Amino acid sequence: MLLQPVGIIRNAVQEPFLVAGRDGISMREELDTSRDRIKSAKEAISEIIIDESRIELLEGIEEYSHVTVLYWGHRVPEESRAVNRVHPMGRRDIPLTGIFSTCSPARPNPVLATVVQLHARRGNVLEVTGLDAVDESPLIDIKPYVPTHYPQTDVRIPAWMAGLMQDIAEQRR
Amino acid sequence: MLLQPVGIIRNAVQEPFLVAGRDGISMREELDTSRDRIKSAKEAISEIIIDESRIELLEGIEEYSHVTVLYWGHRVPEESRAVNRVHPMGRRDIPLTGIFSTCSPARPNPVLATVVQLHARRGNVLEVTGLDAVDESPLIDIKPYVPTHYPQTDVRIPAWMAGLMQDIAEQRR
């Protein structure tokens, strides 16, 4: 299962927010600083540059307001692929949790996915917001975002995840 | 960018619905038959079996009602990774469209993603519904499904995609 990059992401984000290592992950900076950076990364324009030779892959993409971007976590250390459990977002007050229950970039296969808003297309370049990928992340795939594929009712998430979401939302106000 | 399988999917679906080849994709069977099969696949219980050695990856997963499953389209022919445009779902009445604007399994990197409902966990086995993966698809990743990451308002999709969604919804009634 070998992935072929089909483009590259250009972003203001130069360093991962989280530092992943064999013994789990930790925040690179103080929590408030990282929150601010996450917030500004979410609002900034990112560019997705598709290889010129594959430009036909994009035909019709302008008709979507949102797309899902799959990219490779190229700054995730290779050794962290063996990690099974982490403190979510490096928060020691949340118990060790299985990676599949977290959004940690340190995963057995660091294929990272984000729904982004598509603002413009210029030839082989897409301008999007909401993409917190590190600069130069290799592009794996772009998929249409079709909201009916995503249930909004009768969905349950753990209390700790709801708490993290609320912390980030409060920071945004 | 080398993927390591971390498990396998067991499913009643034995053959891909769509046949992908160098010149695009076509439905394996008549449209109505395929629709019925898609419908029953969506309702059937599928099993996701995680490698015993990585069972800790699942810790806490029971607290989610839904998860996103990433798996490898192992029945997608290697040569179809070079395809740039297809008729969506093999429908010749819909114009050729860039793969990134479609849900075609024939993609440059056949990393397929589906949001599934999680019904039960038995040790290293998850029982889910809504997974239309072909039997024995290698598991790449499982991610938490957090609905606030998925916008539901001000989302725009092409008319042809809305039409396809409606066709499938009508079939379900």
Image (cartoon, coloured by chain):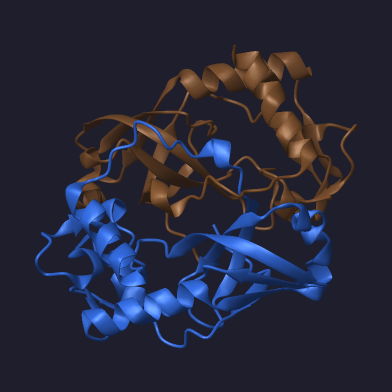
Chain colours: A blue, B brown
Q: Residue at x 73, y 51 (%)?
A: B101
Q: Is residue B24 left or right of residue A146?
A: right
- Tell me which corner region of the image, top left, top right, bottom left or bottom right, holds residue A66: bottom right
- What is the quadrant of the C terminus of chain B in the image? top right
Q: Residue at x 81, y 56 (%)?
A: B84
Residue B72 lies, with reference to residue A123, above or below; the image says: above
Residue A74 visible in image: no
Q: Residue at x 43, y 54 (%)?
A: B149
Residue A52 position, x and y percent, is 81, 74
Q: Residue at x 70, y 46 (%)?
A: B106
Q: Residue furthest top?
A: B173
Viewer-closest of A121 and B57:
A121
Residue A122 position, x and y percent, is 80, 74
Q: Is residue A37 left or right of residue A12?
A: left
Residue A99 position, x and y percent, is 27, 57
Q: Is residue A6 left or right of residue A84?
A: right
Residue B156 visible in image: yes
Residue B16 position, x and y percent, is 64, 31
